[in-house]
Amino acid sequence: MRKGTSLLKIVLFLGLVLAIIQKITGSSAFTSSVLEIFQAIIVTAMPAVIMIAGIYILIRCLFR
């Protein structure tokens, strides 16, 4: 199985679970808090990911 399809399955499953919780509770507060947590993680991790990718590309180009 390719990694892209498993990531897509996880995202779809998470969306389904959040939709079910929202229907059961009748409130979107839980969904909003989960999405805010994901956004905070992404915003915090993105500079590190970009830096690591840049260093990887630099080292790969230098030792080719």
Image: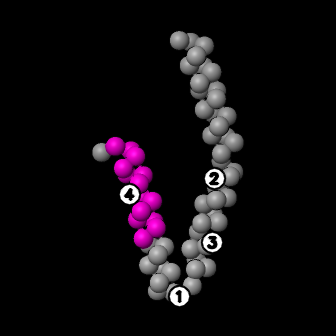
* Location of residue 31 (image quadrant): bottom right
Q: Is mark 2 on a helix, strand or loop?
A: helix
* Location of residue 52 (image quadrant): top right
4 or 2: tag closer to the N-terminus: 4
* Amino acid type shown at disc 1: Gly
Q: How crowded is mark 1: few (under 14 residues within 10 Å), some or many (20 or more)?
A: few
* Amino acid type shown at disc 4: Lys
Q: How far apart are marks 4 and 2 (CA)?
A: 19 Å
* Quadrant of image for the N terminus: top left
- Rendered image: mark on residue 42: 2
Q: Is mark 4 on a helix, strand or loop?
A: helix
Q: Residues within 10 Å of mark 2 (few under 14, many from 20)?
A: few
3 or 4: tag closer to the N-terminus: 4
The reply to whether callout 4 and callout 2 are in contact (CB within 8 Å) is: no
Q: Distance between the residues labelled 2 and 1?
A: 27 Å
Q: Distance between the residues labelled 3 and 4?
A: 21 Å
3 left or right, relative to 42:
left
* Amino acid type shown at disc 2: Ile
Q: How far apart are marks 1 and 4 (CA)?
A: 25 Å
Which residue is disc 1 drawn over? 26
Which residue is disc 4 drawn over? 9
* Magenta extent: 2-16
Percent of width and height locating residue 23: 47, 84
Q: How far apart are marks 2 and 3 (CA)?
A: 14 Å
Percent of width and height locating residue 12: 42, 62
1 or 4: tag closer to the N-terminus: 4
